[in-house]
């Protein structure tokens, strides 16, 4: 997490750095800072707690002008989000910005203190600045000193450094945290995500793990993990920077919720024939590999993990393939027994989530048949390191709480289920053709669910004064309930828990009273009658019920029961449809509570640290 921008140019770079930081705010937004080698040849910085707009205000009042600089937007790991802990960190003539976590920072800190270095922050980053300063005493060159410094760092880092002693360059190092160089004419840039630099260039060079780079105005030199001088491919983006405005919507999240019919449609495009899924959508070797798959292991984090949990129901029910799903932070540190012929599937919006990436790297050592990434970013590390890929076509998602990425992941996972079943011949008669037909109708159904916007907005009023909620679902709707609860807690800060409805009486029923609304998703399937009994258990304890129910489920409003009728849909696709009202519900509750919907407190869009 955190965002890095750097620039070396012939013109003033402060505005470029600030614009880059604004574009990177999705990575963290609790403080921001910039260090510039100023036109009067001094290294100066400005740091502010809070959002980039605070830093911008401070720079308006006291401008820093220069042609070399680095900047950072922070998501606090070590030390509170205050000015003292904001990056850049200084040591003598040096300024450093850092993404990631230095695991051995305590030992290094003690060593450096013993050498007389004074620490002014609680961060792990400051040890890098002092260690580099120390190395520079013997090794006069900044790049050489950086190479020596990173050898002593354990953990993950994306680093950018400038020095008042060698103001012709920006130096950078990548290990576990992405960095990309933006190439200009007579000027060059650095960032943790190319999005930060799209206003100044469309040509990029991605650093690989272990790379060190020296970036000057008119040249870029890169050394790999082994210190070998290397060239990295230049990638050119021809499409204009993606529109990132909210349009008619009040928040990005609402805009992204409403984009779902279009992005689901885009995710399906070119991947369906008349009545089948095109298996080659997963890559040229997909058909051959899928034929061998006997097990699936899914690993992901957050919302993407919930998508994986839905897929488990589909893979076992439709394709008859045993499936396990686990959060990446657990999987990566567990002794895993790998079933024979297992496909390792990661799901990620960003493709840069540190735990998911680490789990993929571990999986490669564990004897999986192959790896597949279902991801929204084609140039991400996850995609580059996986054997097979299916790109969701959600477009850029800015709201921290994921919405359209989730529904497009579900579409991708259903395509995977049908592809595996097709190749292995395990789908029931006519199942694939029927579901392909239903998938084609899905965007229209999602549009119908979005038309219930005003109804859900009214229901949200029931939650504004509550502190706790329960979300219930059965079968593949249980992960949908989990995702609904996650959305509500993320953006409205109301405590929300999800339970499989059948577990209610084994504990959570004790919590149910008039102050604890219970939200349920109730499609018309074979579990409906059982679910209705669970709901009676809630009503009998005075609990307020909010039920999103199939129009044919025969559920009606009553004392303490609010039923919202949903368009009828094929049961397999219902998790995608029923996600929509839960997203809208959390959105409207958050609006009523006046929280920062798009950038909720303490969270970040892309979690590139453990
Ligand atoms: C963060 C985001 C979530 C996201 C999760 C996994 O927590 O705030 O919205 O679901 O990371 O991210 P990924 O990019 O791997 O899907």
Image (cartoon, rainbow, N blue to C red):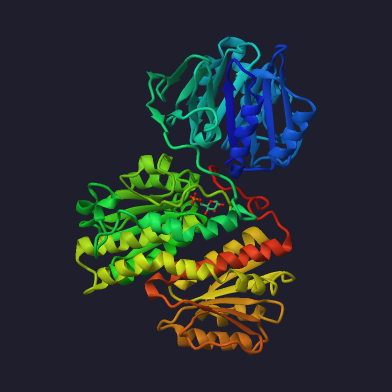
Picture mark count: 0
Q: Can residue 516 be seen in this snapshot?
A: yes
Front residue of 9 and 127: 9
Q: Which residue is most to the right?
A: 61
Looking at the image, residue 315 sits to the left or right of residue 52; the answer is left
The C terminus, quarter of image: top right
* Residue 322 drawn at (x, y percent): 31, 65
* Residue 396 drawn at (x, y percent): 50, 47
Which residue: 42% across, 64% down?
443
Looking at the image, residue 440 sits to the left or right of residue 377; the answer is left
Looking at the image, residue 373 sits to the left or right of residue 499; the answer is left
* Residue 599 drawn at (x, y percent): 64, 50
Front residue of 327 and 248: 248
Q: Considering only vertical position in the picture, is 349 above or below 196? A: below
Looking at the image, residue 498 sits to the left or right of residue 381; the answer is right
Q: Considering only vertical position in the picture, is 313 above or below 107? A: below
* Residue 178 drawn at (x, y percent): 49, 35
Q: Can residue 152 be seen in this snapshot?
A: no
Front residue of 52 and 170: 52
């Amino acid at each position: 997490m955190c965002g890095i921008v750097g620039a070396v140019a012939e013109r003033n770079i402060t505005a470029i750095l600030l614009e880059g930081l604004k574009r990177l705010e999705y990575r963290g937004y609790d403080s921001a800072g910039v260090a510039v080698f100023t036109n009067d040849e001094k290294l100066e910085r400005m740091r502010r707690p809070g959002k980039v707009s605070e830093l911008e205000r401070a720079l308006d009042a006291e401008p820093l002008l220069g042609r070399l600089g680095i900047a950072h937007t922070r998501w606090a790991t070590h030390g509170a989000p205050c000015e003292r802990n904001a990056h850049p960190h200084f040591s003598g003539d040096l300024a450093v910005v850092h993404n990631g976590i230095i695991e051995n920072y305590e030992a290094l800190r003690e060593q450096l203190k013993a050498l007389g270095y004074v620490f002014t922050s609680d961060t792990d980053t400051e040890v890098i600045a002092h260690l580099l300063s120390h190395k520079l005493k013997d090794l006069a060159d900044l790049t050489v000193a950086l190479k020596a410094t990173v050898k002593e760092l354990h953990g993950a880092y994306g680093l950018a450094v400038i020095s008042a002693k060698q103001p012709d360059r920006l130096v950078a190092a990548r290990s576990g945290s992405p960095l990309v160089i933006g190439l200009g004419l007579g000027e060059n840039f650095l960032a943790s995500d190319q999005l930060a630099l799209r206003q100044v260039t469309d040509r990029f060079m991605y650093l690989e793990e272990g790379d060190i780079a020296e970036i000057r105005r008119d040249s870029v030199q890169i050394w790999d993990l082994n210190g070998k001088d290397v060239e990295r491919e230049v990638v050119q983006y021809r499409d204009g920077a993606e529109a990132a405005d909210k349009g008619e919507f009040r928040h990005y999240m609402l805009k992204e919720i409403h984009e779902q019919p279009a992005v689901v449609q885009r995710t399906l495009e070119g991947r369906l024939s008349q009545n089948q899924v095109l298996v080659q959508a997963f890559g040229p070797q997909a058909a051959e590999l899928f034929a061998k798959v006997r097990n699936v292991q899914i690993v992901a984090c957050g919302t993407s993990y919930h998508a994986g949990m839905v897929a488990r129901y589909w893979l076992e029910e439709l394709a008859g393939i045993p499936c396990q799903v686990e959060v990446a932070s657990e999987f990566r540190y567990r002794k895993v027994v790998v079933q024979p012929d297992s496909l390792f599937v990661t799901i990620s919006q960003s493709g840069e989530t540190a735990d998911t990436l680490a789990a993929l790297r571990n999986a490669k050592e564990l004897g999986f048949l192959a790896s597949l990434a279902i991801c929204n970013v084609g140039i991400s590390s996850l995609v580059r390191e996986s054997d097979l890929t299916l790109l969701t076509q959600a477009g850029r998602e800015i709201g921290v709480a994921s919405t359209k990425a989730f529904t497009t992941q579900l579409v991708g996972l259903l395509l995977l289920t049908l592809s595996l079943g097709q190749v292995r011949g395990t789908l029931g008669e006519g199942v694939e053709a029927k579901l392909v037909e239903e998938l084609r109708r899905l965007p229209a159904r999602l549009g119908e669910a979005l038309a219930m916007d005003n109804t859900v907005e009214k229901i949200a009023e029931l939650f504004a004064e509550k502190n706790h909620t329960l979300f219930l679902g059965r079968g593949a709707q249980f992960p949908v309930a989990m995702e609904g609860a996650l959305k509500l807690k993320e953006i409205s800060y109301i405590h929300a828990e999800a339970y499989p409805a059948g577990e209610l009486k084994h504990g959570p029923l004790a919590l149910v009273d008039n102050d604890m609304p219970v939200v349920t998703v109730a499609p018309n399937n074979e579990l409906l009658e059982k679910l209705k009994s669970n709901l009676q258990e809630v009503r009998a304890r005075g609990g307020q019920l909010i039920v999103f129910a199939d129009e044919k489920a025969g559920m009606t409003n009553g004392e303490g029961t609010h039923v919202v009728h949903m368009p009828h849909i094929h049961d397999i696709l219902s998790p995608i449809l029923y996600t929509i009202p839960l997203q809208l519900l959390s959105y409207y509750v958050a609006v009523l509570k006046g929280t920062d919907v798009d950038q909720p407190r303490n969270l970040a869009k892309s979690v590139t640290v453990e």
